[in-house]
Image: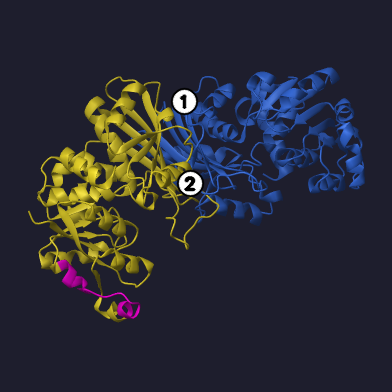
Chain colours: A yellow, B blue
Amino acid sequence: MAKVKVAINGYGTIGKRVADAVNLQNDMEVVGISKTRPNFETMLAHEKGYPVYTLTEKADAMKKAGIPVAGTIEDMVANADVVVDCTPGGVGEENKGLYEKAGVKAIWQGGEEHELAGVSFNASANYEEAFGKDFVRVVSCNTTGLCRVIYPLDRQFGVNKVRVTLMRRAADPRDVKKGPINAIVPNPIKLPSHHGPDVKMVMPHINIVSTAVKLPTTLMHVHTVNMELDKECSAEDVRSIFKEQSRVRLIGQGIGSTAEIIELGRDLGRPRNDMWENCVWDDSVTMHEGELYFFQAIHQESIVIPDNVDAIRSMMELEKDGARSIAKTNRAMGI
Amino acid sequence: MAKVKVAINGYGTIGKRVADAVNLQNDMEVVGISKTRPNFETMLAHEKGYPVYTLTEKADAMKKAGIPVAGTIEDMVANADVVVDCTPGGVGEENKGLYEKAGVKAIWQGGEEHELAGVSFNASANYEEAFGKDFVRVVSCNTTGLCRVIYPLDRQFGVNKVRVTLMRRAADPRDVKKGPINAIVPNPIKLPSHHGPDVKMVMPHINIVSTAVKLPTTLMHVHTVNMELDKECSAEDVRSIFKEQSRVRLIGQGIGSTAEIIELGRDLGRPRNDMWENCVWDDSVTMHEGELYFFQAIHQESIVIPDNVDAIRSMMELEKDGARSIAKTNRAMGI
């Protein structure tokens, strides 16, 4: 069977990781990546063998920097079965006309509105909803992290209410221009935050309320999760459910912070120290007065990557069963 | 009437602020401070006119540094009606015998166990409980911040349950040796944290559960507070209650982070930019599905200072009515 042709529009934090993850699968291939500036990432993309596309007016700059240009972004899109749009939040929206005109499927990231795609996707929670669809939005890192723990607990015990405090990293490790550097920033100050409603885009019946702050750290987000469950269960029952989830990792063994989780990623030899799984602190899983509490850390740069691969497989009807796609993606990536 | 003689045992972050606050009151005076090392703070204490006491074996070092020594710590204690113990957490416990032997009253800070004093104190919530007592513990900054908002809401509406996420600063601005510098540290990992039980030491009937993390910032703590109230009320009702509290400040006007709160403290001309009041973000006060949510920032270095003054007044029977002591303390400090 011919491999599905995947183009990556935007080659930054998410785009370069999606390209590498797609490249590892045996049922899809990277037919091109797009980048507007000839920087170290563009050069590395070229050296990895990904055809580099750019805007017409940027072609000369690319060539001057020693990076061959395969064509315009329109050329790249025309060549693909599906485009993974990894342009900055809000920009992806402007590309919809381009994809429609070319008759290609497209995946957007969580920075875009739900309405743009019509389907908000998390592989663990609603793989089937994207099946055969033309447009899909893979939800943001925080929403992905929440869906992965809420969905299995809801299936097993029923989730009556979720309250979550999202402690968000201020910037990615590569960002040198963002802050805060020594402050806590409630964001948004008006409560609740949009993250709860975003989970409902994937699982409409979940009752969830969220608050969020931005913090002077670059490594990972951390969530304090509180859940009221319908059926009585123990912390051990919850741990057992989490252990069954291939994209949830229970952590302990002296890992007391996000810094040590990233060190684990480095020691595991993960590309770019990526941690694709939710990291739930085993010791934090607690039932208190009939309510569940736990801490989880979410690697904002990489957690949505496997879900992008699964979204491609569902949209392209390569695999009907979500669990089988997840297993296939995991195997290829080394999760 | 003779002023109450107050000795400050330990002249660090809390001790130096308590000394200055006591010094501003017309019914008490600082008869001495103790310090074990001759550093810039000791020199400034001397220059301010506070008699400096130290350990016998440290007297020579003090004199060499140009700081006259008024006597030993035992001498200081013998001279006082009440000692405010501001030594580091866990150390204060060792001084109890000294205070008992000298027959002086003593106040400890929140770093010590409740059992050491028998009374855990917050001026807004249980001023009367310390009346005439020999030993009192002023609860920690986070617990103080929680008591100040829970108590008035409980009186007005009844508090059925409090859930709070404490986002704690990693270190004080002066600390150069502590971290984290780029990580989020769930602390403790085992849930819930001790802060909830500490509130119960002041208000035993309050049902509260807390989780806590340490963050790479030095300025202030931030709490996400969720409360179930017994009586139905609006966000506006809650705001009205907060507005009536002299030690709760509603903030807005472009203040979006702890950094800007500290800048406000500097612009107000506060000593050491101290923010003695809880800072509640006005826009964050929200009723959602019948539950209250809000953000508040807590200045860890200074929030307990006025409560220490009130504790002295209650223990020394200078004022029977908590509200009047609070008003008197506030007036003298400029709150």
Q: Quadrant of residue A108?
A: bottom left
Q: Which residue is mark 1?
A: B158
Q: Quadrant of residue A80?
A: bottom left
Residue B214 located within the stretch drawn in magenta = no
| Amino acid carrying mark 2 in the image | Asp
| Amino acid carrying mark 1 in the image | Gly
Q: How far across and down, in percent of the image, does residue B245 sit?
A: 58, 38
Q: Nearer the viewer, residue B285 or A73?
A: A73
The answer, for residue A221, to whether it is visible in the render is yes
The answer, for residue B118, to whether it is visible in the render is no
Q: Earlier in the sequence, mark 2 or mark 1?
A: 1
State left or right for residue B277 relative to residue B226: right
Disc 1 is attached to a residue of which chain?
B
Q: Which residue is mark 2?
A: B282
Q: Label 1's element? A: loop
Q: Label 2's element? A: helix
Q: How far across and down, in percent of the image, does residue B126 sit?
A: 62, 25
Q: How far across and down, in percent of the image, does residue A250 sit?
A: 37, 33
* Residue range of the region highlighted in magenta in the rendering: A61-77
Q: Nearer the viewer, residue B156 or B166?
A: B166
Q: Quadrant of the C terminus of chain A?
A: top left
Seen in the picture, residue A47 relative to A71 is either above or below; the reply is above
Give the numbered dot on residue A138. Answer: none
| Rendered residue at 51%/29% (across/down) | B193
Disc 2 is attached to a residue of which chain?
B
Seen in the picture, residue B131 relative to B299 is either above or below; the reply is above
Q: For the residues marked 2 and 1, what is the alpha-carbon distance in whole angstroms? A: 21 Å
